[in-house]
Amino acid sequence: MLMARQETSPMRLLTIAAATLLVPFSFARADDKPAGTAEIEKERASEALDLCRRGAREYRLSVDDSGQTELELKTDPLLRWSNPSVGSIHGVVFIWTDKGRPAAIASIYKWFEPHTHMAFEVHSLSETPLVGSLENRAVWNSSRAGIEFKPVERAPVPAETSAGRLTQMRTMSKDFAVEKTERDDGLQQRMRLLTQPIFRYQSPTAKISDGAIFAFVQGTDPEVLLLLEARERGDGPAWHYALARMNSVVFRVTYQDRDVWKTEALPWSVVFDNRSPYNILKLDHLSPRKQ
């Protein structure tokens, strides 16, 4: 969910060329404090949390319908993360829902070293178009569905109890594996699954009796999201899944050792064009460049 770790996550390390071409991020030193000490990183994590909360409240996300139905921001963060392998960076994950179902997710983060910019990395989790606005100005138009659900092959019938369904979802999530390929050097890494879901939900309106979001992470930084839902069908409930990227690099996902999903590296022009389901928006006004 960031921009490169050597150009790893499109949301974290912007190359100077990309920044010059696309978004005027600041790359000055954050402060005079050395990175890496527990005390300093704790202070920075606290500062980032405050900034990220403010950033989440600034954007208005809505369904692109006749009434521009506003999504509900869950003010409690789903996850707080850092990625010391790439520098001093701290982020927070927030979610927006529509009638109880997750519709958009954002990883909002603040660089301290070696960069200083701040950004709002958002992905549509909706099966319908979304729009995002800042100060009544449209800044994001996800003109197509953000995810596509498919049946989970050879999945059990959803259990009758909440505890039983959670056990099933945790078991199914372990059958998925995510491999990431870096943009520049082609380095391949397997992402780590967080065994507990970062969000769990129900939506009677959407005929979803249970659902959860699992995160595949680098460090604690989410890179790919797995959604599992028990969906009502004519012949009864059945498990379905969908996947969402939180990085613009190449991902390969397997389920029970069979390929089920692969992404291509997104050009920077797509990442910042404000029309794709996965997009990066500016937040530098919350964290101005220090002189």
Image: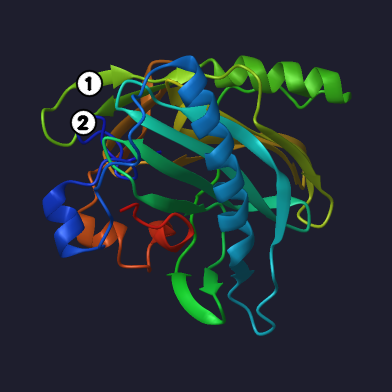
Reading the image, the residue beneath label 2 is: 182
Badge number at residue 51: none
Badge number at residue 188: 1
Screen quadrant of the N terminus? top left
The answer to the question of whether label 1 and label 2 lie on touching residues, with beta carbons closer than 8 A, is yes
Q: Is residue 19 above or below residue 232?
A: below
Is 257 in front, or is 173?
173
Q: Residue 28, percent across and down?
A: 25, 47
For residue 278, what is the image quadrant?
bottom left
Q: Residue 70, percent across and down?
A: 69, 70
Side of 154 relative to 25 (left or right):
right
Residue type at numbered disc 1: Gln
Q: Residue 260, percent across and down?
A: 39, 32
- Secondary element under disc 1, as helix, strand or loop, is strand
Q: Is residue 38 visible?
A: yes
For residue 78, what is the image quadrant?
top right
Q: Is residue 246 visible?
A: no
Q: Is residue 181 above or below residue 107?
A: above
Check disc 2: other Cα within 10 Å, few if <14, some if 14-19, many if 20+.
Answer: many
Check disc 1: other Cα within 10 Å, few if <14, some if 14-19, many if 20+.
Answer: few
